[in-house]
Image (cartoon, grey):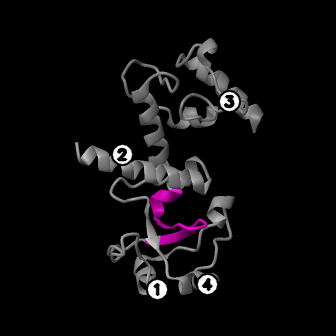
Amino acid sequence: MFRQELFDALKIVDSGDVEPAAMRGSWAGALGQPQFMPSSFLLYAQDFDGDGRRDIWKSTPDVFASIANYLAAHGWNKDQSWGREVRVPASVLQGLSETAPPQTEGCLARRQMTAALPLATWKTLGVKTITGGALPVTDFDASLVSGVKRHFLVYPNYQAILGYNCVNAYGLSVGLLADRAAAISKHK
C-alpha cells in the first residue's frame, strides 16, 4: 500500500500542485487539511480557487471543494440529511438484536450500527425525534447508532461520512457540527 502511496506522492510533486518542501502530512502520509492519502489527492483534490493548483494545504476553497468532491464520490446526496438524534423506547433497545441486528460487514463503526430499516419501520417501533415528534415521511432506510445515553438514526449520507473516516464519534461529530452551522447560518 505505502509503496503505491509513495509513487502517488511523487506524481503530486511532478504535477506542480505543490512544492516538495510545502508537501506536509502526517506520519502515515495523510496530506494537507483534509488529510488525504496521496491516492485520494489524485482522485479527489480540486482547484476551486482557479489558480491552476490543487492546494489542500493553504487554499480554503480548494480544501472544501476537495472534501465535497470526495463525499460526493462516496454517495453524498445534497438533498438529504446525514441523520438525527432520536428517542428510542427501552423495549426497542432491549429487543434490538432481533429487530435490527448489528451490521456484519465493514469497518468497526459500521459493525456498531444496526442493519438499515425503512424509516417507517422505526416509526412503527415508537422511535421519535429528540423533541418527541414524529419521524419524517421518507423512502430511505436508516440505521441506529447508539452511545451510552444518546441514539441516532443515520441515513445514507452518514455512510459517505464514514467513507471519509470510519469512526462513529467522528461521523456523529461532523453531522452534529454541520447541523449547528446550518442553524446558525439560517438565523443570520
Compute the Cα span from label 1 to label 4: 12 Å
Q: Earlier in the sequence, mark 3 or mark 2?
A: 3
What amino acid is found at the position of numbered circle 4 in the picture?
Gln
> What residue span does the magenta drawing correspond to?
141-159
Disc 2: CA contacts within 10 A as few (<14), some (14-19) or many (>=20)? few
Q: Which mark is in front, 3 or 1? A: 1
Residue 47 visible, this orientation = no
Query: In percent of the image, x 62 and y 86: which residue is there?
Result: 98
* Residue occupied by mark 3: 26
Residue 77, position as x, y percentages in the image = 39, 55
Residue depicted at x 25% and y 48%: 186
> Which x, y percent locates residue 55?
49, 23
Instruction: Give the vertical position of 133 relative to 38 (above or below).
Output: below
Q: Please tell me whether residue 38 belongs to the stretch shown in magenta.
A: no
Q: Which secondary structure lies at badge 3?
A: loop
Q: Which mark is residue 94?
A: 4
Tag 4, which secondary structure? helix
Choose the circle earlier in sequence order: 4 or 3: 3
Question: Circle 1 is placed at which residue position?
Answer: 125
Q: Give me the C-alpha separation between circle 4 and circle 3.
A: 42 Å
Query: Pointer 2: what residue?
Result: 181
Proximity of marks 4 and 3: CB atoms separated by less than 8 Å: no
Residue at image coords 23%, 47%: 187
